[in-house]
Amino acid sequence: MFRKYIALPLFLIMITGFAATLERPAKITIKNNVDMRNGPGSYYKLILRLKPEATVNQIDQEQQWLKVKTNNKTGWIPERSAYTSGTQPESSPDQDQVTGNAEDAFDELAKGEGDTSGSATASPAQVAAAVKGFAKTFTSQKTNRQETELVENFNAYINPDAYEEFRNKRLGSWTWEKAQSRVKISTDKAPVLDPQREQIGWGIANVIAQHGLIRDRALQQYLTHIALVIAENSHSYETSVQVYILDSEQFTGYACPNGAIFVSKKVLQTIESEAEFAFFIAHELAHVVLNHGMQETKKRETKIRAEQRFNELNQELDNQEEKYKKTEQELTRLANQIYEYTVKDRLKQYEYSADYWGIAYVYRAGYDPHGGLNLLQKIYNEDGDFKQQIGKAKWKGTSLRKRIIKIENQIEDYDLPDGYGMSYPEVWHQKMQGLGE
């Protein structure tokens, strides 16, 4: 009888110990630069930036986001940014070089908020210092101004509660698995966070903003909410997007490498539903997440030049100020090339690719893909085909007729049920009332 009383507590201790073993945080290794946020989404605030090969403890998971703990801080990172159990780090010399270049550039431009070199993390203040420093310099070179208002709120642009309320109304019980059942995409094909590209993106965005913005916070939030719904259904679901309204009568749109998307007043006045705007944003976002600007820039450089892009940063320089200048010069050179790509007509293969994936993102998010067709047909009816109008404005370069035909075939292949997809024309018109007045 005495043995029975002893056996039961021992059994409970064994069970408790086994459960504790199962719940013990799993140590995982970070693949690439990644932002750890205070919630499972790109619209939450930045807590830390983790560098490649940093180790963190995974304590939970929600959809495609992992909850992790490191440096006594707890936050969320995209699943695709970490090596989970059973996987091994794989890299190539080229990727290692790119990663090293990006980190060197970030470390140099973050000076003044603490040295990040040799550290596995960077603070929001250090990230902001690198971003703002380059944006100010690049803007000054392009416009003779130094205003960086656009960059001031890069870590506090979205209210998470407001966005999640909007998303729940639009998507209901959406899951990543449901989106994958519509159009399956591989997130491995999307580029990862590159601090160099982020700095360049904010610099370019700040320059574009100097052309004049319409300051309507409520409208910007509404447009950004739609953009976030699309971003969460893209190859790079952790992309932090922000929408800005250009005070322009041209049918114009720009997508910057940092996720900033500019849409002109003329575009908003032409569009008649959320579904049409969703396609416009999805098309621009596809250029960002598929890295078209960086791809085109790299093609213009010789392989030797690409390998030497940040060669100076690997040299031991006694003068830190000179090292900073060299870093900034290299970033500026690359930024100028990407800026030219951003504001000029794109190659038709990139436009076709952005159309294809734009329609796919819209479909995955539950919007009516015909909105994209409606928008392009509307522009075609108003302005004709763009084949002979290259150079007039953004979205006016590649033949619209060919784009329309390709999208028609793509939607037909989806074999959509009658009445599929959201559109919300009434809500759209209500939101656009008084635009620019």
Image (spheres, grey):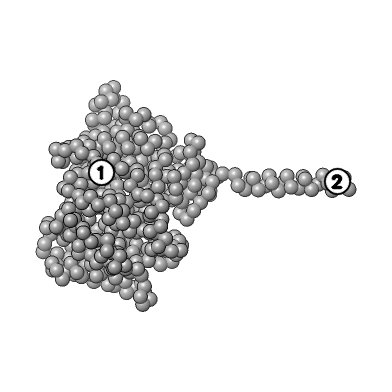
- Name the residue rendered at 28%, 58% in the picture: 281
Label 2 SS:
helix
Which is nearer the N-term, disc 1 or disc 2? Answer: 2
In front of the other: 155 or 323: 155
- Name the residue rendered at 86%, 46% in the picture: 3
Q: Which residue bears the numbered disc 1?
A: 150
Seen as rendered, the residue at the extreme top is 318
Q: Which residue bears the numbered disc 2?
A: 3
Is 408 situated left or right of 92 in this image?
left
The kind of residue tagged 2 is Arg
Is 12 situated left or right of 424 in this image?
right
Which quadrant of the figure has residue 311? top left
Visible in this render: residue 322?
yes
Visible in this render: residue 299?
no
Decide: marks 1, 2 in contact (CB < 8 A)? no
- Name the residue rendered at 40%, 57% in the picture: 165
The kind of residue tagged 1 is Leu
- Name the residue rendered at 22%, 44% in the picture: 206
**Label 2 Cα crowd, 10 Å radius (few <14 / some 14-19 / many 20+):** few
Query: Separation of disc 1 and disc 2 at Cα?
Result: 73 Å
Which quadrant of the figure has residue 162? bottom left
